[in-house]
Image (cartoon, grey):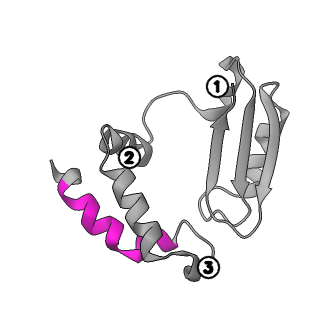
Amino acid sequence: NYWRKNIPVLAKSHRVTFQCYHGTSQVTEELVQIILHLGLGPGAVDVFLEFICYSDGLLPEELLQQVKCPVLIAWGDKDPWESIKLGRVYRDFDAVEDFVVLLMLATALKFALS
């Protein structure tokens, strides 16, 4: 499988990880190894491919209308792909219990709470 063979090479490239974090000093060898370990887990390649291919699955706003448990959304204010302005729109959904802005972090994290 192409992706399974190349994920270690991609993960070791700090360039890829730098895009997810605001400030390159936060990207340590330990972080890269943790991401690599998770990326090689069962089903991880499928999840990665779904993410980068923008599958024809439900959009976040469609999912938030259906979810039955409270949701916490934590959004990095330095996300290079999805701005904090975009994330704040999700605060208005009934299922969203809390929306937390993660200062100086570039990734947007979504969590479901039970």
Going from the N terminus, do you reach mark 3 or mark 2 first? 3
Which residue has dot 2 on it? 48
- When the figure is inspected, residue 65 is found, relative to residue 21, above or below; the finding is above
Instruction: Please tell me whether residue 13 belongs to the stretch shown in magenta.
Output: yes
Q: Position of residue 98 (x, y in %)?
A: 82, 39
Q: Nearer the viewer, residue 51 or 97?
A: 97
Q: Is residue 68 highlighted in magenta?
A: no
Is disc 3 in contact with disc 1, using a CB cutoff of under 8 Å? no
Q: Position of residue 70 (x, y in %)?
A: 75, 26
How many labels, in total?
A: 3
Magenta-tinted stretch: 5-18
Name the foreground residue: 114 vs 53.
114
- Label 3, label 1: how far apart the Cα atoms are: 33 Å
Q: Identify the residue shown where x is 47% and y is 67%.
A: 31
Separation of residues labelled 3 and 2 (CA atoms): 24 Å
Q: Is 109 rendered above or below residue 18? A: above
Write down the residue under mark 1: 62
| Secondary element type, mark 2 | helix
Amino acid marked by disc 1 = Glu
Q: Is residue 25 above or below residue 31?
A: below
Q: Residue at x 69, y 67 (%)?
A: 78
**Spot occupied by residue 22 in the image (x, y as percentages of width and height):** 63, 73
Label 1: few (<14), some or many (≥20) within 10 Å?
few
Query: Which secondary structure, mark 1?
Result: helix
Distance Cα–Cα, label 1 vs label 2: 21 Å
Q: Amino acid at mark 2?
A: Phe
Mark 3 secondary-structure assignment: loop
